[in-house]
Image (cartoon, rainbow, N blue to C red):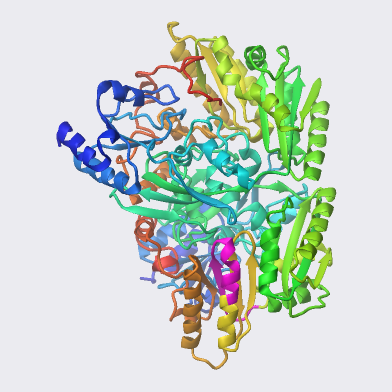
């Protein structure tokens, strides 16, 4: 099967843009190593590589910056790493139209720098935002704390170009912010983990940077107090960009990374970001302080603008992901916002039972709760698997879903990282069969091992 | 299956009240807000998702397509039974099932009227944001099918940004949820792929919507210009300055001539164009934005600026915009509304070109539209009784769509492709692009089952497809109550 492939790839891309054997080791996923890595330079080359792979029955993993490759089940087969690193240009930027079109391999940080030249930004703040590529962020539908105000990648994407396993290239959407021509395939590709096609380019709506960003932290003695304070703050006129609740380990980590002075290191924190015209930000910071103080929740400390806004934002966006622990695992639950305190409490309780203190952080108003569990140590993988099962059960009981966002391959062998399939799964299977009939792209890594 | 047997079986599902088959009853369902007509074989009104599912299965047995239908206010023929079949209406599924004020969501049946939802949650300090101009009449199910927009979508997004989940009936009669009530769910974004599919992938039987808190402050400004060009430059400049108003609407001289005598807004009848600009949000933001907007308008040559900060004043200013289409009947017996989108920076030149195209075809145009997101609604005015007028109108429409595409835009911003623009989809997308979309439809097993003949090109040559029985809406009196565009 593989005999003719390396020379065929070298013919397509040039020998400098193909790696084989040991040289491809960097592209391992969950301990699976591909035989080859390819670095196409144009969408047509990507399409040609995919067509070759489909013909030869190869399994392909698309690669961006590699920051999110820990997500998903291990690939059921893995022959070829397809790197989008050479497709990294800004194709079309119209500041006066507030739209930008980029190739998928551009790191988000580099795009933000370009947009900043015109006082604009793309309001996405996933972890490792500097290095993560736009294509990878779209494929994972990755979000960060400012999702509360600005939405998820699906809400910002207006046009896309995709390479298909049969070697064709296609477009969906366009370059204007209102467009209902044809099916909204932008939404289909976003979050599809590269299993339906490989993203070549994307067009986004961008926004002017807020004139001022202000931050605030309030610390309470209990989870319940912090959650109630945060929840009720959503009802006041203030419009936070982000509003996160942190448990003590999370607060301590944030304090370390952002240089915050915390007098109550055992407290539960509410962290808020505000952006806009300076007068509006000042008023919201005041509203925050007043609200946290006057609610009768036994406020221990409230501080505004305690760190440069950029630094705090970066620390908040990366919180939990900043200190990678290959032997630990990360969970991501999605529930209705009112269920947040129950999730956090259930998880902390599970932690106490097994003698672990996870770092837990929640996006108030959005309903996403993440926890990060440290090294499992000498326990067998089944210990972690059992813990995950109990944590997942707690979330399911609250009507939500749980994703194991990262964990060691030995644990992946024992858990399904995506959880039970929804009732629409047969429809998803049919979509996969239509778009990738030979299971060329990321086979087995997505929900239900699609 | 013979017709009387089919009717009997349908009676068994929805009861005798729920099936319409007499010719005079079917006629009411022959049209929507567009220029197309199509008589359904039967009209059925289910009361639940289960009844809708049984109807779908029965239709399949009978070899008839299913054409879902909301209020019939659509402007592209989406609800028109172009190939006959069973029209499914939702007049008996219009309950608001649940409102969760704390989690800011609601669960509704598809027949709920858009504005009624906002009214129902106003006392909680909440509202449903997407506000298509027909919101007094259109239904949420229809909004989902078309991914409807509206003036306030500039800052807040369209239907797909405000729907969390859909319960749908698929081609095989299965009832299934796409998405749900939470922000994230594993798997493909089927809800997102379904929204805007114009009734071709299935029937919506429940919708989980996001509700937003009402803004703290709102300021509406009317800016009056002597020249259309100045107004469109002002639009580009507002966006270019980094202001995203909640709404930014434009009306031209022709529209003002029709509107000014009829509405309480005191619109200047002799202006070249007016802009209606609304900013909302926090007090301080709104004050600053309104100030900047007025500055930009003055720089662009506005001769008058009028501001309203209270509800009554804003209502007055908006009445002119909302009364615009209805007022066009004073100018001509018929109108044809287009729906192109262009990048905002291209607005001035595109509007000029639209004027030239219309003039060349010896027609008149009234421009009234969502300037803030580049979504044009040129209303071509004519008299369909005049020999050749219809052909000239359709030809002008095609040229304007071409113009929008050449300017880097789109053929439809919010009205949908439907019947009206299906051939133009081939101007927007390549054969490969369209084939990929059809893959989605094949996965839903819905090809030709739901709303056949819509969205995708027929493969027939342009000219032939555009001919055929079409009647244009009357300039006045032919509009559903409360409809404005």
Residue A361 in the image: above or below residue B175: below
Q: Position of residue B418 (x, y in %)?
A: 42, 32
Q: Nearer the viewer, residue A341 or A208?
A: A341
Residue A210 in the image: above or below residue B416: below
User: Residue drawn 50% across and 82% down?
Assistant: A387
Any part of residue A130 in sight? no
Any part of residue A23 in sight? yes
Q: Position of residue B268 (x, y in %)?
A: 73, 15
Q: Position of residue B385 (x, y in %)?
A: 43, 7
User: Residue drawn 85% across and 49% down?
Assistant: A279
Give left or right: position of B82 versus A95.
left
The single residue placed furthest to the top in the displayed view is B386
Quadrant location, the C terminus of chain A: bottom left
Give left or right: position of A402 versus A255.
left
Q: Nearer the viewer, residue A265 or A318?
A: A265
Give left or right: position of B3 versus A65.
left
* Residue B359 colored in magenta in the image: no
Q: Residue B279 is drawn in which quadrant?
A: top right
Q: Nearer the viewer, residue A299 or B298?
A: A299
Give left or right: position of A237 versus A60.
right
Q: Residue B129 is drawn in which quadrant?
A: top right
Residue B347 in the image: above or below residue A410: above
Q: Position of residue A350 (x, y in %)?
A: 55, 82
Residue span colored magenta: A324-345
Residue A81 in the image: above or below residue B367: below
Q: Residue B317 is drawn in which quadrant?
A: top right
* Residue A331 colored in magenta in the image: yes
């Amino acid at each position: 099967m593989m005999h003719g492939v390396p020379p065929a790839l070298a013919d397509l891309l040039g020998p400098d843009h193909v790696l084989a054997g040991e040289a491809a080791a960097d592209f391992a996923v969950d301990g699976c190593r591909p035989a080859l890595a390819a670095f196409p330079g144009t969408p047509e080359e990507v399409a040609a590589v995919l067509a070759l792979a489909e013909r030869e029955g190869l399994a392909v993993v698309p690669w961006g910056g590699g920051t999110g490759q820990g997500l998903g089940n291990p690939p059921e087969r893995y022959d070829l790493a397809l790197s989008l690193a050479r497709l990294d240009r800004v194709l079309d930027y119209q500041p006066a139209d507030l739209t930008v079109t980029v190739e998928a391999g551009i790191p988000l940080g580099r795009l933000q720098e370009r947009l900043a030249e015109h006082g604009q930004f793309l309001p996405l703040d996933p972890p490792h935002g500097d290095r993560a590529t736009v294509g990878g962020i779209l494929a994972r539908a990755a979000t960060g704390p400012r999702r509360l105000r600005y939405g998820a990648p699906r809400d910002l994407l207006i046009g896309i170009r995709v390479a298909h396993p049969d070697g064709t290239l296609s477009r969906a959407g366009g370059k204007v912010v209102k467009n209902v021509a044809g099916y909204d395939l932008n939404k289909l590709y976003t979050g599809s983990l590269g299993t339906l096609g490989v993203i070549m380019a994307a067009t986004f709506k961008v926004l002017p940077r807020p004139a001022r960003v202000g931050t605030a932290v309030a610390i309470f003695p209990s989870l319940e107090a912090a959650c109630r304070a945060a929840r009720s703050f959503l009802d006041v006129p203030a419009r936070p960009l982000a509003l996160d609740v942190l448990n003590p380990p999370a607060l301590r980590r944030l304090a370390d990374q952002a240089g915050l002075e915390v007098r109550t290191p055992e407290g539960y924190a509410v962290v808020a970001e505000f952006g806009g015209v300076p007068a509006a930000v000042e008023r919201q910071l005041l509203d925050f302080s007043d609200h946290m103080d006057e609610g009768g929740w036994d406020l221990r400390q409230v501080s505004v603008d305690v760190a440069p806004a950029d630094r705090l934002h970066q620390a908040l966006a990366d919180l939990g992901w900043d200190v990678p622990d290959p032997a630990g695992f990360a969970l991501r639950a999605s529930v209705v916002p009112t269920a947040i305190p129950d999730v956090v409490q259930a998880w902390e309780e599970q932690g106490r039972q097994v003698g672990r203190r996870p770092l837990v952080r929640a996006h108030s108003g959005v309903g996403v709760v993440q926890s990060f569990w440290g090294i499992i140590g000498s326990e067998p993988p089944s210990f972690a698997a059992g813990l995950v099962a109990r944590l997942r059960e707690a979330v399911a009981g609250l009507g939500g879903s749980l994703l194991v966002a990262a964990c060691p391959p030995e644990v992946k062998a024992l858990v399904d990282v995506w959880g039970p399939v929804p009732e629409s799964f047969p429809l998803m299977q049919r979509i996969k069969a239509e778009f990738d009939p030979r299971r060329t792209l990321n086979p087995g890594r997505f929900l239900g091992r699609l | 299956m013979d017709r009387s047997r089919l009717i009997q079986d349908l009676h068994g599902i929805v009861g005798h009240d729920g099936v319409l088959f007499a010719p005079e009853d079917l006629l009411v369902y022959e049209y929507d807000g567009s220029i197309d007509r199509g008589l359904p074989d039967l009209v059925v009104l289910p009361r639940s998702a289960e009844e809708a599912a049984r109807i779908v299965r029965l239709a399949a047995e009978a070899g008839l397509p299913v054409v879902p239908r909301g209020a019939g206010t659509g402007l592209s023929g989406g609800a028109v039974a172009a190939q006959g079949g069973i029209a499914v209406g939702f007049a008996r599924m219009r309950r608001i099932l649940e409102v969760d004020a704390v989690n800011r969501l609601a669960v509704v049946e598809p027949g709920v009227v858009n504005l009624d939802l906002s009214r129902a949650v106003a006392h909680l300090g909440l509202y449903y944001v997407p506000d298509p101009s027909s919101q007094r009449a259109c239904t949420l199910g229809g909004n989902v099918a078309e991914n409807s927009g509206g003036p306030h979508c500039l800052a807040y997004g369209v239907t797909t940004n405000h729907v969390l989940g859909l319960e749908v009936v698929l081609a095989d009669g299965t009832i299934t949820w796409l998405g749900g009530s939470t922000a994230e769910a594993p798997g493909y974004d089927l809800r997102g792929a379904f929204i805007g599919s114009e009734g071709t992938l299935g029937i919506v039987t429940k919708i989980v919507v996001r509700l937003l808190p009402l803004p703290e402050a709102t300021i509406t400004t009317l800016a009056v210009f002597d020249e259309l060009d100045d107004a469109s430059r002002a639009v580009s400049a507002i966006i270019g300055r980094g202001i995203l108003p909640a709404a930014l609407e434009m009306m031209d001289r022709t529209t003002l001539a029709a509107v000014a005598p009829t509405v309480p807004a005191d619109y200047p009848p002799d202006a070249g164009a007016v802009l209606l600009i609304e900013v909302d949000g926090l007090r301080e933001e709104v004050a600053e934005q309104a100030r900047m907007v007025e500055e930009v308008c003055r720089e662009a040559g506005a001769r008058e600026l009028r501001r309203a900060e209270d509800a009554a004043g804003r209502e007055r200013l908006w009445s002119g915009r909302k009364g615009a289409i209805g007022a066009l009947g004073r100018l001509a017996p018929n109108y044809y509304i287009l729906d192109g989108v262009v990048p905002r920076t291209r607005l001035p030149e595109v509007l000029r070109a639209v004027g030239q195209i219309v003039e060349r075809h010896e027609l008149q145009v009234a421009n009234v539209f969502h300037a803030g997101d580049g979504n044009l609604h040129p209303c071509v005015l004519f008299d369909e009784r005049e020999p050749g007028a219809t052909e000239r109108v359709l030809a002008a429409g095609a040229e304007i769509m071409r113009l929008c595409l050449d300017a880097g835009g789109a053929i439809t911003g919010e009205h949908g492709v439907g019947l009206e623009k299906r051939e133009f989809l081939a101007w927007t997308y390549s054969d490969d692009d369209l084939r990929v979309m059809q893959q989605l439809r094949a996965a839903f097993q819905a090809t030709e089952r739901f709303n056949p003949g819509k969205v995708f090109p027929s493969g027939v040559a342009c000219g032939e497809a555009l001919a055929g029985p079409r009647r244009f809406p009357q300039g006045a009196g032919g509009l559903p109550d409360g409809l404005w565009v």
